[in-house]
Image (spheres, helix red, strand yellow):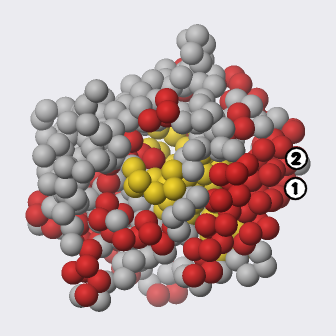
Amino acid sequence: MGVRRDEPGHETEWPGALDVRALLEGGWRPTPIRDFILKVHSRCNLACDYCYMYEMADQGWRRQPRRMSRQVVAWTAQRIAEHARANLLPEVEVVLHGGEPLLAGAEHLRYAVEAIRAAAEPDVRVGFSVQTNGVLLDELFLDLFAEYGVSVGVSLDGDEEGHDLHRRRANGRGSYQDVRTGLRRLTGPRYRHLFGGLLSTIELRNDPIATYEALLEFRPPEMDFLLPHGNWDAPPPGRPADESAPYGDWLIAIFDRWYAAEAGDVRVRLFSEIIRLLFGRMSASEAVGLSPVAVAVVETNGEIEQVDSLKSAYDGAAGTRLHVSRDPFDTVLSLPSVVARQIGRRALSEQCLACEAHEVCGGGLYPHRYRSGTGFRNPSVYCRDLLKLITHIRDVLSRDLDGATARPAATVV
């Protein structure tokens, strides 16, 4: 077995040698953690072939307990409350995650919500959400989520044909019809207020407009399109050797349709964040922009990790060697691997800094920058796609603004 990269001896890859003390002495201060992702169950009832948890470099899930114990939940609740109070945070967000979190069972999820609220209240408000594949979404869970105001996000990759390309059960059977049934329950009058939105992983073989319209069918308040995880060592599917940008083209097709027709009704997170950044505002997404990433993950065994998408880079990339039984979340904020995601443009490669779009792009999603030997100080493996998308959105907005200023003042809304 090879040496795990979170063990000593791999400090040469960025950001292993990042001098945190020098940053602190220079006046930089960490951003407290506001988003906590709890891996309440480490297994899944689907076998999606693109899954970063089970199909990519880090196979740590095999060493994890299936379900987060009540003791780990209690420790986590105390650590969240401790961190919020120490950093004067009036509210934090907790995501119940997996694997598939509904496999933990309704009563276990109830215990987790109640334990965290009891530890945090009355001075810290906790918002809860759950990210599920939707297969098990029935009235038992929906009544629980309604009781505690838990927002529900569902993963859906388009219409039945597009969704079932990857999101299948272990026996090969597609999951679309089960997900659709769950979504129909969620979007009915009784539970629609819980609907947080849809998450869709891009598949270039799927028609972008057909995919978008399949998501629109459920009238989500928000949707987001995720680039398949990959990096310079393990490129994503369909990444060409030439200068083309197929993922950028795929997203542009949806942007043009959304911007012309539905932008006032449904938020597409990636597009909305790019627009915010183009107008000089901060991003609320780690996919683009230079805002500090303030997220911590707690695994089922109580280990504290960084955002779980890092598992797509290499074995141990998300590890911190910390545990909720003994380590406060403040400790996470002094780790070079975490600090690197909070220092903005100082973490970017020279190539990124030379690009006119770097403050909007932000280097792209951090895991997509990895290259063995240099680590994460590289452009995103999706660099061309992001540049094409950002440039297109900028040009569309510029045309609109130019047209608005050219009209008589009385006609400008």
Distance of label 2 from label 1 (alpha carbons): 6 Å
Q: Quadrant of the C terminus?
A: bottom right
247 or 81, which is in the foreground? Answer: 81
Residue 80 pos. (x, y %): 62, 67
In the shown orientation, is residue 9 left or right of residue 130? left
Query: Which residue extends farthest front?
Result: 326
92 or 320, which is in the foreground? Answer: 320
Q: Are marks 2 and 1 in contact (CB under 8 Å)?
A: yes
Q: Find disc 1 in the rendering and name its residue.
A: 147
Number of other residues with Cα within 10 Å of mark 2, as a class: few under 14, some 14 to 19, many 20 or more: some
Displayed quadrant of residue 387? bottom left
Q: Disc 2 residue type?
A: Asp
Residue 272 pos. (x, y %): 47, 62
Number of other residues with Cα within 10 Å of mark 1, as a class: few under 14, some 14 to 19, many 20 or more: few
Q: Residue at x 32, y 54 (%)?
A: 366
Q: Secondary structure at mark 1?
A: helix
Residue 328 pos. (x, y %): 53, 68
Q: Find disc 2 in the rendering and name its residue.
A: 143
Residue 62 pos. (x, y %): 49, 29
Q: Secondary structure at mark 2?
A: helix
Q: Quadrant of the N terminus?
A: top left
Q: Disc 1 residue type?
A: Glu
